[in-house]
Amino acid sequence: MNTEVLLQPAIDADTKAAEKKAEHEINKLSKRLHRQVGQAVTDYNMIEDGDKVMVCVSGGKDSYALLDILINMKQRAPIKFDIVAVNLDQKQPGFPEDVLPTYLKSRGVDFHIETQDTYSIVKRLIPEGKTTCSLCSRLRRGILYRVAGELGATKIALGHHRDDIVTTLFLNMFFGSRMKGMPPKLVSDDGKNVVIRPLAYVREPDLVRWAEHREFPIIPCNLCGSQENLQRVQVKAMINDWDRRFPGRVENVFTAMGSIVPSHMMDKKLFPFETIKASGAPVEDGDIAFDEDEACGTPAEASPSVIRLHPNE
Ligand code: SF4
């Protein structure tokens, strides 16, 4: 008897089971993404009744996902808000002009394409070989703020996610000596707009999977020819490595960003160290003198082998 005929039902069953599993996983992912965005929006009061949310869409996976999820949320939200998608065509060589308008029309969402040749300005002003991102971002920011005003947008939504937020924290610590992350909601530096990041709770690998599933027409992000900032690349590699070797660590760092104890840091602007006095009453979060997991101090008669930190010392 033909063995292929005998094996076929088993193969069909395996394929069906795999398809069912994949569908189940996508359903779970969809629920998680919508739940996390809904939670972040609620926790930080990002979108209010009557808002017009300008969603900045670059053609990358994150901003596509942001727009996609907000469109779905708008249909089910108990409040009324409008969405307008905005793309800035910076005239980078090879930018496929029709991709975003075609996609946005297919989603039935209001949109505006702002065409400004920042690419030429950056090329003209920045010497060859120098990094162009900082001027480029400054120009882009100014244009988007202006467009938000012209469109009557009350919020500007950006597609930064949880990994961007943690990466920014470490970038600022490692290279700027500051504990400064990326806020879920903040007034823009020109004081005229409120910037929100509804993907703040979403992990990047989930966005990668969602983009694949939804088949977003991704526009490559290297059209300007600029390399990604090396420091950012290093920090992202560190975070990805932690994710692989120490599951939960990045989540803990992220959670810690929302659970700061100023009295246990060293910033005199955040806590009045100079003027504190003992009141005699117990203080929650007061100093416990030694951390509970700390070893019990200097060994009294430590042998050289105990105090040697390095075998060659
Ligand atoms: S990568 Fe290119 S487009 Fe993006 S900010 Fe840098 S210079 Fe601008």
Image: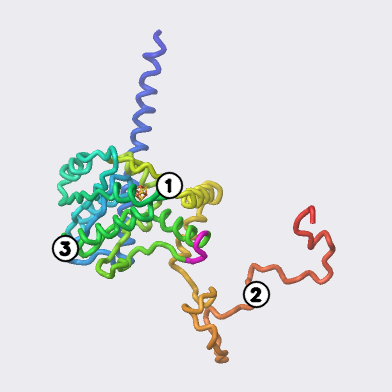
Crowdedness near tag 1: few (<14), some (14–19) or many (≥20) residues, C-alpha within 10 Å = few
Identify the residue position indicated by label 1 in the image: 228
Q: Nearer the viewer, mark 2 or mark 3?
A: 3
Identify the residue position indicated by label 3 in the image: 152
Q: Earlier in the sequence, mark 1 or mark 2?
A: 1
Q: Quadrant of the C terminus?
A: bottom right
Query: Residue placed at 37% from the left, 41% from the top?
Result: 225
Give the answer, above or below, for where 278 lies relative to 127: below
Mark 3: which amino acid?
A: Gly
* Residue toward you, 259 or 124: 124
Crowdedness near tag 2: few (<14), some (14–19) or many (≥20) residues, C-alpha within 10 Å = few
Q: Which residues are magenta?
A: 175-179
Mark 1: which amino acid?
A: Glu
Under 8 Å from ligand 1: the CB of mark 1? yes
- Whether residue 25 is visible, yes or no, is no
Magenta: predominant secondary structure element? loop
Identify the residue position indicated by label 2 in the image: 290
Under 8 Å from ligand 1: the CB of mark 2? no
* Residue toward you, 156 or 130: 130
Residue 98 disc label: none
The reply to whether dot 1 and dot 3 touch (C-beta < 8 Å) is no
Location of residue 279 in the rendering, given as x and y in whole percent from the top left corner? 55, 91
Mark 2: which amino acid?
A: Phe
Colour setup of the view: rainbow
The answer to whether residue 293 is left or right of residue 145 is right
Secondary element under disc 3, as helix, strand or loop, is loop
Under 8 Å from ligand 1: the CB of mark 3? no
Location of residue 217 in the rendering, given as x and y in whole percent from the top left corner? 27, 39
